[in-house]
Image (cartoon, rainbow, N blue to C red):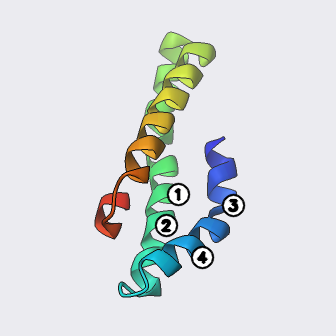
Amino acid sequence: SIFGIQNSFGILHVMLEKEHADQGQFKVAWVGALAMGMIFFCSPVVSMFTDHFGCRKTAVSGAALAFIGLLSTSFANSLMLRS
């Protein structure tokens, strides 16, 4: 689900660009770039969790964490809070 959100970030980028027109396209693009960077930055840690706790528990925990993150950023008005 996370890679699906990242692969469709172009749609979100257009919406964020309209909402934050005063910030500039470069700052709006950082939201997607940092999100993709965090996926690859956290991969080694998630791999250790998968080895220790198993795939199912790690996937459910990751999905819950992603849901909380997406839900909390939906209330954020500032672009800096979203990145």
The image quadrant that residue 20 belongs to is: bottom left
Q: Give the Cα distance between marks 4 and 1.
A: 17 Å
Q: Give the Cα distance between marks 3 and 4.
A: 11 Å
**Kind of residue indicated by mark 3:** Ser
Q: Give the Cα distance between marks 3 and 1.
A: 12 Å
Secondary structure under badge 2?
helix
Disc 3 crowd rating (10 Å Cα; few below 14, some 14-19, many 20+) is few
Foreground label between 4 and 1: 4
Q: Tell me the residue at 56%/72% (across/down).
A: 15
Which residue corresponds to mark 3?
8
Foreground label between 3 and 1: 3
Residue 80, placed above or below residue 21: above
Please identify the quadrant where the N terminus is shown: top right
Which residue corresponds to mark 2?
33
Secondary structure under badge 1?
helix
Q: Earlier in the sequence, mark 3 or mark 1?
A: 3
**Kind of residue indicated by mark 1:** Met
- Looking at the image, which is closer to me, 28 or 75? 75
**Residue 36 shows which numbered tag?**
1
Secondary structure under badge 4?
helix
Q: Earlier in the sequence, mark 3 or mark 4?
A: 3
Which residue corresponds to mark 4?
14
